């Protein structure tokens, strides 16, 4: 195992609404991202992806509150740190966050270079503006962004260019962890590919040491991240390598996510798409037992009364491949039984 850049242990955070209700949006989440690796987080809208991203920065302000757990960046535990210290010592350098729809939040009256000056000067007020301009120009050039973008205003840039610019601004201090929340969701396919390529280039060039890519589209993560976590109702329900998660999902929810997505490849037009019926539970009052039980076609009596935790599974292959070992899922049914059911359904689907 490589060096851990980000280690998250049993992180639990919640919103407290103005009506004093608790919304348990991140519930005992644990995972690790190693140096040079990227991890994807997928799940339906409202499952807690953005809240997890916000929570990982260790920078809490109402209505979001830290409850328990650890966030360890490159060996340093930042949970419980004073928010002012987090802002000065952690944000931008240790961890950078690109919020959902960040490109539309840029102040339209300022030039791109000004945003970069803000980020660098907040960290190091002594830097000269000439040095900042040189650094920004070099970084833009190496990332295939035209340097003259630095003198433009956000409104003068296309959507794709604006998003790549936001990513370049947010990572100008070369953070150890980059969290990108749905960075390509609002873009056309060509711009999506350019955004993803740029993030990968930044990893290869060492401008970021690890990455978390959040999306509601699980298949998008293939070829983008090394591994994938699937989240449901504030909890992780499955984790594994990207290839395993996309081609061989085990948890009924991950399987449902894959089956409800159109894969635009030849010969797949006739494949029946099955949306997952029902809606996720209200996180103000999550159900006991398995949170997916009301929507799961494999649900049994025990599922609603038994607290299901994440369980590791998989064996080392004859070639010594340990990757299967790193898989985990949150379900009462043994893996082989779930897979048998999936196989039978597929055979049934093909013969009908
Ligand atoms: N400011 C807030 N106050 C209270 N509840 C919130 C707030 N923001 C999000 N939530 C709730 O937290 C849950 C997770 O939301 P979010 O993290 O935005 O999900 P995702 O990013 O996966 O779509 C949802 O139930 C949402 O309604
Ligand atoms: S624990 Fe039960 S309800 Fe939950 S996913 Fe597994 S089979 Fe479905
Ligand atoms: Mg979100």
Image (cartoon, rainbow, N blue to C red):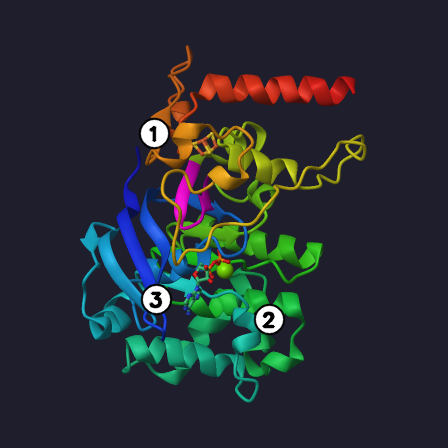
Task: Residue under label 3, please give it.
Answer: 21
How far apart are the alpha carbons under marks 1 and 2? 41 Å
The secondary structure type at the circle numbered 3 is: loop
Q: Quadrant of ligand 1?
A: bottom left
Task: Residue under label 2, please give it.
Answer: 162
How far apart are the alpha carbons under marks 3 and 2? 37 Å
Residue 171 visible from this viewpoint: no
From the top left corner, tell me how far across and down residue 164 is, in percent.
56, 65
**Does residue 205 appear to the left or right of 268 in the view shown?**
left
The magenta stretch spans residue 321: no
Q: Magenta span covers which residues?
A: 227-238
Q: Nearer the viewer, residue 90 or 152?
A: 90
Q: Earlier in the sequence, mark 3 or mark 1?
A: 3
Provide the major secondary structure of the magenta segment: strand
List the single residue furthest toward the top.
318
Q: Nearer the viewer, residue 212 or 139?
A: 212
From the top left corner, tell me how far across and down residue 62 is, in percent.
32, 73
């Amino acid at each position: 195992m490589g060096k851990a850049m980000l280690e998250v242990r049993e992180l639990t955070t919640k919103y407290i609404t103005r009506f004093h209700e608790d919304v348990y949006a991140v519930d005992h989440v644990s995972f690790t991202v190693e140096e040079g690796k990227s991890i994807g987080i997928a799940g339906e809208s409202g499952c807690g992806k953005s809240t997890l991203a916000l929570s990982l920065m260790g920078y809490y302000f109402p209505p979001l509150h830290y409850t328990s757990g650890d966030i360890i960046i490159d060996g340093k535990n930042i949970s419980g740190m004073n928010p002012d210290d987090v802002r000065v010592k952690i944000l931008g350098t240790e961890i950078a966050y690109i919020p959902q729809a960040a490109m539309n939040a840029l102040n339209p009256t300022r030039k791109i270079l000004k945003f970069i000056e803000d980020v660098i000067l907040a960290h190091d007020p002594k830097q000269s503006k000439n040095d900042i301009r040189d650094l920004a120009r070099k970084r833009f050039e190496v990332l295939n962004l035209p340097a003259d973008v630095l003198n433009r205003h956000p409104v003068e840039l296309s959507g794709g260019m604006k998003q790549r610019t936001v990513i370049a601004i947010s990572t100008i201090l070369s953070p150890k962890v980059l969290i990108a929340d749905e960075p390509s969701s609002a873009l056309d396919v060509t711009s999506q590919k350019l955004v993803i390529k740029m993030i990968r280039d930044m990893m290869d060039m060492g401008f970021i040491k690890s990455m978390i890519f959040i999306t509601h589209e699980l298949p998008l993560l293939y070829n983008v991240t090394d591994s994938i976590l699937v989240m449901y109702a504030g909890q992780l329900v499955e984790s594994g390598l990207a290839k395993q998660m996309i081609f061989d999902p085990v948890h009924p929810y991950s399987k449902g996510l894959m089956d409800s997505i159109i894969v635009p490849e030849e010969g797949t037009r006739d494949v029946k798409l099955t949306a997952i019926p029902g809606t996720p539970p209200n996180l103000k009052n999550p159900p006991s037992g398995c949170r997916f039980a009301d929507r799961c076609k494999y649900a049994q009596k025990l599922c609603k009364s038994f607290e299901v935790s994440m369980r590791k599974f998989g064996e080392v292959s004859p070639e010594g491949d340990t990757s299967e070992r790193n898989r985990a899922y949150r379900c009462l049914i043994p893996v082989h039984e779930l897979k048998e059911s999936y196989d039978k359904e597929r055979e049934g689907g093909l013969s009908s």
